[in-house]
């Protein structure tokens, strides 16, 4: 909104996509949760990779805004699912 497209893209990549990828890795490839985007095509389910690809490629600032919202929503669902899964595992022990 401030007209700093490069800053906006950098923040999107570092503060939105990176945490999303880390949470998805914790879910699907926990031993490599800190590998960032490396080996995503080999370690995550194809449908997850396809969704991520759509978020990584930005057409313009309006598209960035839309994808920011989508990524934040996905992160919320992913972190909730991961938290609930951990809770269930602890209860079953």
Image (spheres, rainbow, N blue to C red):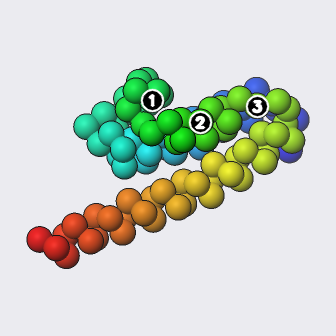
Name above or below for residue 48 compared with residue 57. Answer: below
Q: Quarter-wise, where is residue 53 in the image?
A: top right
| CA distance separating discs 2 and 3 | 14 Å
53 with respect to 36 (left or right): right
* SS label for mark 1: helix
Quadrant containing the N terminus is: top right
Q: Which residue is mark 2?
A: 50
Q: Residue 22, which numbered label?
A: none
29 with respect to 69 (left or right): left
- Image coordinates of residue 13 in percent, x first then y, are 61, 34
57 with respect to 17 (left or right): right
Name above or below for residue 71 compared with residue 6. Answer: below
| CA distance separating discs 2 and 1 | 10 Å
Q: Which residue is mark 1?
A: 40
Q: Quarter-wise, where is residue 85 in the image?
A: bottom left
Q: Which residue is mark 3?
A: 58
Observer-nearest of 24 and 45: 45
């Amino acid at each position: 909104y401030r007209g700093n497209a490069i800053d906006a893209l950098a923040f999107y990549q570092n503060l939105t996509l990176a945490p999303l990828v880390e949470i998805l890795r914790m879910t699907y490839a926990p031993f490599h949760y800190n590998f960032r985007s490396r080996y995503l095509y080999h370690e995550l389910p194809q449908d997850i990779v396809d969704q991520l690809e759509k978020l990584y490629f930005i057409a313009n600032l309006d598209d960035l805004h839309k994808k920011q919202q989508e990524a934040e929503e996905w992160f919320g669902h992913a972190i909730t699912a991961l938290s609930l899964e951990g809770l269930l595992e602890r209860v079953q022990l």
